[in-house]
Structures are given as C-alpha cells and as structure tokens.
Amino acid sequence: MQNYMSFISKDLQIDAWSSIEPLFNDLLDRPLNNQTELKQWLSDKSDLDAFLEENMAWRYIRMTIDTTNDEFSKAYSFFVTEIAPKISPIEDQLNKKLMACPFTEELTQKDEAFHIYIRSVETSIDLFRDENIALQTQISEKSKEYGSISAAQSIEWKGETLTMQQAAKLLKEQDESIRKEVFEKMASRRSQDIEALETLYDDLIQLRHQVAVNAGFKNFRDYKFVAMGRFDYTKEDCFAFHKAIEESIVPIARELQKKHCIQMNENPIKPWNLEVDPDGKEPLKPFADGKELLAKTLTIFDSLNPYFHSVLDQMEQKSYLDLDSKKGKAPGGYNYPLYQSGYPFIFMNAAGSHRDVVTMVHEGGHAVHSVLSKDLELTAYKNLPSEVAELASMSMELLTMDAWSEFYPDQEDQNRAIREHLEDIIKVLPWIACIDAFQHWVYENPTHTRGERKEAWAGIQTRFGNPFTDWTGYEDAKAYSWHRQLHLFEVPFYYIEYGIAHLGALWVWLISLKDKMKAIEDYMSALKLGYTRSIPEIYQTANVPFDFSKSRLDELAEFLKQELNKWK
C-alpha cells in the first residue's frame, strides 16, 4: 500500500477547513470498482486518519505542557471547534460508502482484523447524529477546562511554589507538622475550585445525556458503552467486577489500612498520616530529575529486553518526552500515540517520588505497545481499546520490579518499593471500582442534585473505602475527593479498564515468576496484534484470562497475599 506522502503533501498545514477538504472529497468521489481499488481507498483513508490524529495530538501535547500559553490553547481549540465538527459528518459518509461497497463483505470474511474494524464502523454509523456534532464540540471544549483548573492549583511552601504533585511528596515526610501543614494547604487550595468543578461536571453531565438521548439511548452510560466499542463485556460484567473487588480485594486493603493505623498508634488516623512510612523511614528518593529517571529506566528496559530500550532511546532522540513537573503544566501523565511518526510522546509530572518510577515504566509500556503495533496496515488497527492498552502498561510495571535495583541499590529499599507497589495495586483496585460505580450512578440519574450526588459518593466510599480515617474538620476533602479523578471530566467511563488490566497484568507477572522469557514473548506477541483481534483473544495470546469473576479474583488475592509476605 502506498505511503501517506503520495496522498497527503508533506508540507500540508491545517490552518483552515479548505486545507484538507479536497482530501475528503477525493475519498468521497473515488469509485470502488474492485477489491484493489477498495484496498487503495482504505490505505489512503488510513493515511488521512493518521495525519489528522497526529495533528490534533501535537496541539493537545503542547497545550498540556504549558496551559498558560494562549497560542497553544487556541490552536487546540481551533481543531476542536473548526475542524473536528466538519470531519464528523464526512466520516459518516465515508463509513456508509465503505459499507455500501460490494467488495467490503468479501474482505471482512477473509480478514479477521478487518472484521474487527468493520464492527466499529457499523457502530459509528448507528450512533451518528447531525445534532450531536455541536454538542460534542461543546463537550470537548468543556472537558479541557478541567486541565486548566487543575494545572493552576499550587501551594506556597518555604518560599517556593509547588505543584500538587510536588507537594504530595511532602506527605511522606517523617515530620508530622510538615505533613499536616502541607495537607491543609493542599485541601484549602482544592476547596477554592469546588464550585467551579461542580458546575463544570453539572454541565458535562447534561451535555452528555443529551447526546445519548439524541442517539436513541435512555442514558449516557448505555450510549457510551456502545460508543467505546465494548463488544466483549457489558454493564452487568462491570457490576460483577465491583462486587468481586468488594468481596475479594477490599478486605485485604482494609487489613493493610488497619495495620498502618496500629503501626502509627492512631485509630482512626488523620488523613495526612496515610502516606508516611510507619517505621519512621524517609520517603524513597529514586532519582533527582527527569533526565536521571529516563536514564535509569533505559537501563532497566535494556535488561528486560533490548527492544524495550530501543523504543525509549528513539523517543529521547526525537525529543518525544516531557517528564518533569512544572508550574502551568497540566496534571497527570500519558503516552500519546503518533500514528504518522510511528513513535509516541510521553508526558508526565515527575517530582522525584517512587510513584514517578511506576508512572515512567507504565507509560514506557504504552510506548512499547505503540511501536510494536506501528506497522500494522491500517490506522484503525493501532487505535487500541483501553483494556488492551492498559494491559501493556500495567504488565510492564510488574515485569520491571526485579530490576528496580537500578533506582534502589540498597536491597531493603528495593524490597520496600516492590511492597509499596503491590500495596498500591491492592488499594487502587477498590478506588477503580469506586469511581466506576460512581459513574454508573451519575449517568443513570442525570437529573440528580448536587446534594444527591454528594450522598451517592459517600455511600459508594463506604462500600469500597477506608473506614479507619478521621476526616473531622476536612469533610470537603473527602466529599469531593473524586474531583481529582480527571477521567470523570475528560474521558467518562474510561477507568474500569485499569482494573481489568491490573488483573491481566497480575496474571502476566504470575506466569513470569515461572518462566520470564516465555511471559515476555507472549506479552510482546499480544501487543503486536494491536486491535486486530477481540480483547479476549489478545489476552489469550498473552496467556492470561480475560476474566474478572470472583473466583479468579480470589486466586489473585491469594497470590498477592503470598507475594506481600515475601517483600517485608
């Protein structure tokens, strides 16, 4: 198939709709008289998809690196408001043209990867509504407000301005007066944005609900499950996941939390004492800055598999990394695929903590996935479902643990880092269930009041959360803790994938303890598939079950308890 350069000029700039309209018109008008012409048409459409995806990607990347730069924000808004709305109806026409082509069915029957793609095309056709274009534009614009609000949050500490990520490191300091003061500063700063974030969420809920109603759905949850292409599990499976987490993992998490209280000689415990090491050890300090973080990660990846090292090395050479936390930078971290370039971009907010090490190898796992699947025939094959994408990143976290000595030369520190990571997995699984259950409630009840939402969140926290913390005087910090979860604002219903992938990654790790080389081979084989097979088939290729039933979780819970005992 031809290179995109023969269809798209290498000098093409998107400064107006007229810049790219001729390309769409070409695809719309081109005859498809045989399968050869169909394949060429698919190739050219794929190249255009890659070009547009990457153009928007760079606008988003620049905006999140510096949210204070008006030009970056305007460039992203221009694409969202002026380009994307015009693409949407033409994309629908192209999808219909593809489905009407008499040679599409033949190709679908012969090629399983194409079958996976076509079912997504059919879904897009079913969901498309002209009246939703303007609403989706509003949602995109509204969603980006969350990043600006969060990026502006900082505290003053000893004459310095600290981002929330930098400030959070101080919650691990041994001096309780420091922890308390920093916690209160962070809570106070966040409280200033409660009204803004509540209003933003109210607006997003109503816009999303209207999109769903326009498409013929009862609520946004049901619409979103279809829109996300959740072909392989249902909302009932999500409820089963919640229940299994509640019954198999929450008891272990609460046992860890209770033990922490006992060690701290404080029950109930104050919220600023949740992260500190109870044995009086200083916080782990694995690296000084992003440069050192990358260098040590490169060494670890090389020890695991030289191919992994080569991916990050190429990204460094291309300057496709922005790792350090700084003022004005949006929160969080991501690996943004760049389908045209082939290599992705890693964005994160490193501040020198162990959590940053985990984030780096996590995003590195995504990067390896992006590059392993970059040569697949169509851009659609590289557009991964999150359950698969997160399997790559979560598995990389666990597969690298025995090489964390690069960050922690002292064996005791490495043991502590591994134990902390396993404990974090045990703690985050209930939080994932909590956030997912909250989203189900929110969109099942789109006319709810803020008071009802607050009450629902409190009930869900009681079901999955930590009952040993005393929030007296800091009730708002608990009541609005969900404000810190950007997925709720920016990518609704994208979060349970982390939980599903955590379970898959634990199986990858369990297998690797018996035969690491084989586990890595199977892992890479799964990642190379991109999205050319169903999610269960991709998991099967990695030699792990796509199964989050209680019986499976009981197995993993027992495995986790045994492993925790090894890293004391």
Image (spheres, grey):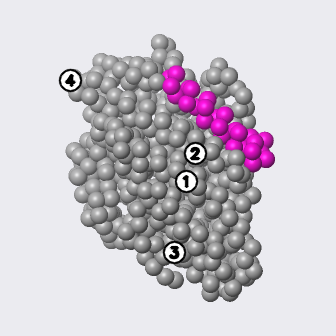
Mark 1 surroundings within 10 Å by alpha-carbon count, few (fewer than 14), some (14 through 19), many (20 or more): some
Q: Where, quadrant-wise, is the C terminus in this rendering?
A: top left
- Is 169 drawn above or below residue 44 in the view shown? above
Quote the CA–CA distance across marks 2 and 4: 41 Å
- Is 217 drawn above or below residue 362 in the view shown? above
Tell whether label 4 touches label 1 (CB within 8 Å): no
Quote the CA–CA distance across marks 3 and 1: 25 Å
Q: Is residue 476 left or right of residue 181?
A: right
Magenta stretch?
194-222
SS for callout 3: loop
Q: Amino acid at mark 2?
A: Thr
> Which numbered disc, 1 or 4, marks the residue that appears first in the sequence?
1
Q: Which residue is mark 1?
A: 84
Q: Which residue is mark 2?
A: 137
Instruction: Where is residue 426? Give x, y as percent.
Output: 51, 42
* Image depth: mark 2 or mark 4 in front: 2
Most common SS among magenta residues: helix
Instruction: Where is residue 110? Give x, y as percent.
Output: 69, 82
Disc assigned to residue 159? 4
> Which numbered disc, 3 or 2, marks the residue that appears first in the sequence?
2
> Which numbered disc, 3 or 4, marks the residue that appears first in the sequence?
4
Q: Which residue is mark 3?
A: 376
Quote the CA–CA distance across marks 1 and 2: 8 Å
Instruction: Where is residue 69? Give x, y as percent.
Output: 33, 41
Q: Amino acid at mark 4?
A: Gly
Residue nearest the observer in this picture, 432 or 404: 432
Instruction: Where is residue 74? Give x, y as percent.
Output: 41, 44
